[in-house]
Image (cartoon, rainbow, N blue to C red):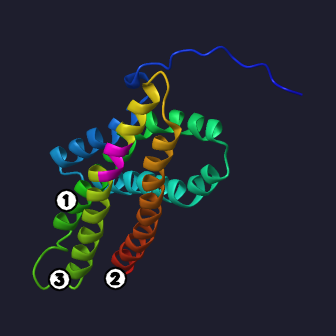
Amino acid sequence: MLEPSLPATAPPPLTRQMTWWILILPATMVAALWSRNLYLLDWTHILSASLWTGADLFLGFVLSTVLRRLSPAERKAVIQFLVPRTLLYLPIAALTTSTAGWYLANWLGFLAPGNANRPWIFAALAITTILTVQGLGVLLPNQVRIWRELQRPNPDPDRIWKINRVNLRLAGVQGVLQLIILLVMAHLVMG
């Protein structure tokens, strides 16, 4: 049985679709830095890292395989819903994670010359730098391109899919790098 189609309505403005609650993380990080609260800074780092890593793993390994199996109209609907919600979420989670992590490493003395964990911190920094450059330099601009294309009266589904395919591949790379950085973090915790 066919479902009745809903009338086409204009999507809400981009600012109403974004995940504004994510700004709680950098605000908490700033409060932790200002008050020099190690516990709060560690909590912020762990929570933002969990949200960032979880999103990267989900996008890279789960959603990418689902999108490949959807019809173009279904794919468009998912992308149209997802893109505005990740525009703020992913960069804020990534930047909060890395900034809080750097301060934690410094406060805990891991950056001191001669500290046995110092190479592991620089490995984490290298991985985080790659993740951040890919995220802010490629994924985020591509998301904006997709969102703009979807706002056109007749969006080009091939263009959207081509851009999104790059994002999905990079999300897979990001997922693998996230797994590697989890190994580095596990070493730091157990080291």
**Is any part of residue 19 visible from this angle?**
no
Q: Which labelled disc corresponds to residue 103? A: 1
Q: Which residue extends farthest left?
A: 113
Q: Residue at x 47, y 63 (%)?
A: 172
Sooner in the amino-acid sequence: mark 3 or mark 1? 1
From the viewer's side, name the closer residue of 95 and 2.
2
- Residue with the mark numbered 3: 115
Find numbered disc 1 in the image and state the secondary structure of the residue it sits on. Answer: helix
Amino acid found under the numbered disc labelled 2: Gly
Query: Distance from label 3 to label 1 (Cα)?
Result: 16 Å
In magenta segment, residue 140: yes
- Residue 98: where, in percent of width, then height? 26, 58
Sooner in the amino-acid sequence: mark 3 or mark 2? 3
Q: Residue at x 33, y 55 (%)?
A: 45
Amino acid found under the numbered disc labelled 1: Tyr
Graded by Cα atoms within 10 Å as few (under 14), some (14 to 19) or many (20 or more), the crowding at tag 3 reads few
Amino acid found under the numbered disc labelled 3: Asn
- Residue 10: where, in percent of width, then height? 51, 16
- From which residue to which does the magenta span run? 138-142
Residue 52 relative to residue 6: left or right? left
From the viewer's side, name the closer residue of 146 and 159.
159
- Residue 75: where, in percent of width, then height? 60, 41
- Residue with the mark numbered 2: 191
In magenta segment, residue 27: no
Query: Distance from label 1 to label 2 (Cα)?
Result: 19 Å
Q: Which residue extends farthest right?
A: 1
Q: Quadrant of residue 100?
A: bottom left
Mark 1 and mark 2 in contact? Answer it, CB < 8 Å. no
Find numbered disc 2 in the image and state the secondary structure of the residue it sits on. Answer: loop
